[in-house]
Amino acid sequence: MKGWSEMGRIELSWLMEWLAVAELRMRRVPGLGKLYAAAGAQSTVEYALVGALVVIAAAGALTLLGGEITSVFSRITNTLSGAAPSAH
């Protein structure tokens, strides 16, 4: 039975070989590397747009619910102030 370290070396060597083959394939096909870079840039833009939408939605929710949130925190503060032991 193989030990964990030997299995890790086998998996790592397989991964390194796979990466080398992938790199050679990219070098053989002109423009393939640029295509992968463009796809990565597209993903980055999509993540930025989703992040911007989340920020806009959060700002809108806080604006609409601002009064209710303030009253909830005020009640929590009053409750905790009443429950705190007096300092003597």
Image (cartoon, helix red, strand yellow):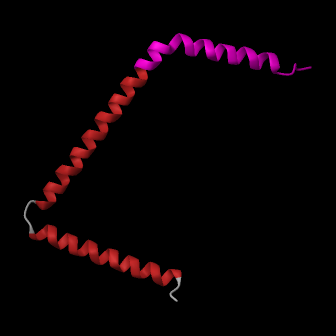
State which region is magenta.
60-88
Instruction: Tell me if 11 is positioned left or right of 21 in this view.
Output: right
- Vertical arrangement, residue 30 with respect to residue 44, above or below: below
Residue extending furthest toward the left: 30
Instruction: Tell me if 35 is positioned left or right of 49 in this view.
Output: left
Residue 9 x/y as whole percent? 43, 81
- Vertical arrangement, residue 6 with respect to residue 84, above or below: below
Q: Which of 31/69 is in front?
A: 69
Residue 33 x/y as whole percent? 15, 60
- The quarter in which the C terminus is drawn is top right
Image quadrant assignment for residue 18: bottom left
Residue 35 x/y as whole percent? 14, 55
Residue at image x 43%, y 24%? Answer: 58
- Vertical arrangement, residue 14 with respect to residue 73, above or below: below
Residue 37 x/y as whole percent? 19, 53
Overall secondary structure of the magenta section:
helix
Q: Does 12 appear in magenta?
A: no
Residue extending furthest toward the front: 1
Instruction: Tell me if 72 is positioned left or right of 44 in this view.
Output: right
Q: Which of 65/32 is in front?
A: 65
Image quadrant assignment for residue 19: bottom left
Residue at image x 17%, y 73%? Answer: 24
